[in-house]
Amino acid sequence: MNLLDEQILVTGGSGFIGTNLLARLTAQNIEALAPSHGQYDLTSQYDVRRMFIEARPTVVFHLAGLVGGIGANMKRPAEFHYQNLVMGAHVMHAAWASGVKKLVTLIGGCSYPADAESPISEACLLRGYPQTESAPYSLAKAMSVVQAQAYRKQYSFNAIVLVPGNVYGPHDNFDLGSGHVVPVLVRRFVEARLTDANTVTVWGTGRPIRDFVYVEDVCDAILVAAEMYDDPTPVNISSGVPTSIYELAEAISGVTKFTGRIIWDQMKPDGQAVKILDVRRQEKVLGHVCGTQLVVGLEKTVAWYRRNAI
Ligand code: GDP
């Protein structure tokens, strides 16, 4: 499939990955429609149908979702579950019903079972209950895998599911309460420098290990998958490189030139101990490597945050 020939619709186009994907598409002269939340409420089946009738897409990137870090997931589990479940179900159903050629949808690495051994391969999906702090969200998203496989089997509908690791980069959610660890720490360290604070507090023990991946690498993988991957098996999209939260905090401290002390708030949750994705399938079926070094991605993210948010 050549995306230049398709009518593309991006849901969640004003979100983190959506904004970056639209920039990537524009850079390749590929046009895309990205309706706002105000135009269509994707939790409403009526609005979703109306969106497909009005936009008439042939390819859909479903990136809309209610997302947040561990704190937000623990505070609002019902909203995170309901909205993601319903949006995913409506969008895939309407895409099939309106004759869309291909739907690309994303779920989080947190959808894997809490006890899945890292590096986590795609075969582990739905083999166990995810980390409890974010399970209502993670399982709602994981239903896309079931729905995609069911619609492929019964209707030959071409939906593919991609599973990114811990994505970070420009346009992320830098809100201290609801953001993921990278944007929250970027903000805390940048603000500490601005206010000459000599301490920065980070949640947990610093021991958890994550697989951080730069958003532009993820967007490139999404576009490659849209053009050439047509298989029911989900594909992990990540760097596959393990980094502890301690190393991450040290790296952000270095990039922001913070010289004070890091305080570890062990009253706050660590979440899953280790979460690294197995990226062999990504490399094999997409021929793609998410190769941006963490420190390079962090430098770009800090520079963007300083330019845009202060
Ligand atoms: P997830 O645990 O992979 O779903 O993603 P998060 O980005 O929410 O958290 C990753 C790790 O960073 C966890 O071990 C958190 O305890 C740790 N962490 C440290 N400080 C923060 C913070 O201020 N916000 C968040 N969200 N996580 C933090």
Image (cartoon, grey):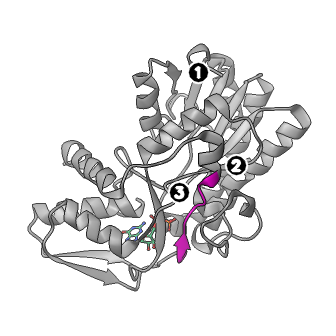
Question: Was residue 298 drawn as part of the magenta stretch in this picture?
Answer: no
Is the distance from the Cβ of mark 1 to the nearest ligand 1 atom less than 8 Å? no
| Ligand 1 quadrant assignment | bottom left
Element under disc 1: helix
In the drawing, does residue 245 fall left or right of residue 110?
left
Q: Residue 237 at what x, y percent from top left?
A: 56, 50
Cα distance in 3D space between marks 1 and 2? 20 Å
Which badge, 1 or 2, is on the more N-terminal residue?
A: 1
Q: From which residue to which does the magenta span run?
A: 272-280
Q: Residue at x 85, y 44 (%)?
A: 150
Residue on which the image places disc 1: 3
Label 2 crowd bin: few (<14), some (14–19), many (20+), radius 10 Å: many
Residue on which the image places disc 3: 165
Q: Residue at x 35, y 57 (%)?
A: 294
Residue on which the image places disc 2: 234
Label 1 crowd bin: few (<14), some (14–19), many (20+), radius 10 Å: some
Cα distance in 3D space between marks 1 and 3? 25 Å
Whether residues under marks 1 and 2 lie with C-beta atoms below 8 angstroms apart, the answer is no
Task: Work out whether 183 lies above or below 23.
Answer: below
Element under disc 3: loop
Q: Residue at x 64, y 46 (%)?
A: 284
Amino acid beneath label 2: Pro
Task: Work out whether 101 lies above or below 284.
Answer: above
Q: Quadrant of residue 179?
A: bottom left
